[in-house]
């Protein structure tokens, strides 16, 4: 006696279905279902990269903007593709300030520094270095005070170097 069994995943239990007791039509239908079940279960059990050929334009709350008919097969982990899509959206939605400077400091920070620089304990040393012709100190002092005297000191030091 040959017995055919279907391994079926259900609630983390494996169920065995005896196909000997079924009619011929039921056996054919069950065989087709078994084949479909294995085709659907095996790719999800594998950590290997798989080609997804369905229309993946909308999956849950995420939109990939992919269409297998247009783009061809999509290779890779679906969760990874969703992470890439999210990062691309963040990149394209990123706003770069148009005012200058914009990387480490901006106009708001410079204004705040200008309000407080005179009471800082290092300011007299910076001012003295600028008055003695230090190009960097003079440029920094000009940015804080907007005094053209410090701009000219920085320019002269730059021309001499």
Image (cartoon, rainbow, N blue to C red):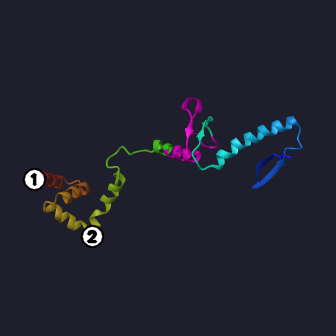
* Mark 2 Cα shell of 10 Å, populated few (<14), some (14-19), many (≥20): few
Judge whether 19 appears above or below 120 on screen: above
Q: Which mark is residue 160?
A: 1
Rendered location of residue 113, percent (x, y): 32, 59
Q: CA distance from mark 2 to mark 1?
A: 30 Å
Rendered location of residue 12, percent (x, y): 75, 55
The residue tagged with tag 2: helix, strand or loop? Answer: loop
User: Foreground residue, 119 or 45?
Assistant: 45
63 in magenta: yes
Image position of 113 (left or right of 150)? right
Query: Which segment did they paint magenta?
Result: 59-87
Identify the mark nearer the N-term, 2 or 1. 2
Residue at the extreme left of the image, as rendered: 160
Task: Give the residue at x 14% y 52%.
Answer: 158
* Mark 1 Cα shell of 10 Å, populated few (<14), some (14-19), many (≥20): few
Task: Give the residue at x 27% y 64%.
Answer: 118
């Amino acid at each position: 006696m040959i017995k055919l069994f279907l391994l079926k995943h259900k609630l983390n239990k494996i169920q065995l279905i005896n196909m000997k007791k079924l009619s011929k039509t039921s056996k054919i239908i069950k065989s087709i279902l078994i084949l479909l079940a294995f085709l659907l279960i095996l790719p999800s059990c594998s950590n290997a990269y798989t080609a997804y050929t369905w229309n993946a334009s909308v999956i849950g709350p995420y939109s990939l903007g992919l269409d297998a008919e247009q783009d061809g097969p999509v290779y890779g982990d679906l969760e990874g593709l969703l992470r890439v899509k999210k990062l691309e959206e963040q990149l394209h939605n990123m706003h770069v300030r148009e005012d200058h400077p914009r990387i480490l400091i901006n106009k708001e920070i410079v204004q705040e520094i200008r309000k407080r620089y005179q009471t800082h304990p290092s300011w007299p040393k910076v001012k003295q270095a600028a008055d003695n012709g230090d190009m960097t100190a003079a440029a920094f002092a000009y940015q804080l005070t907007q005094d053209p005297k410090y701009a000219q000191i920085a320019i002269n030091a730059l021309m001499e170097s």
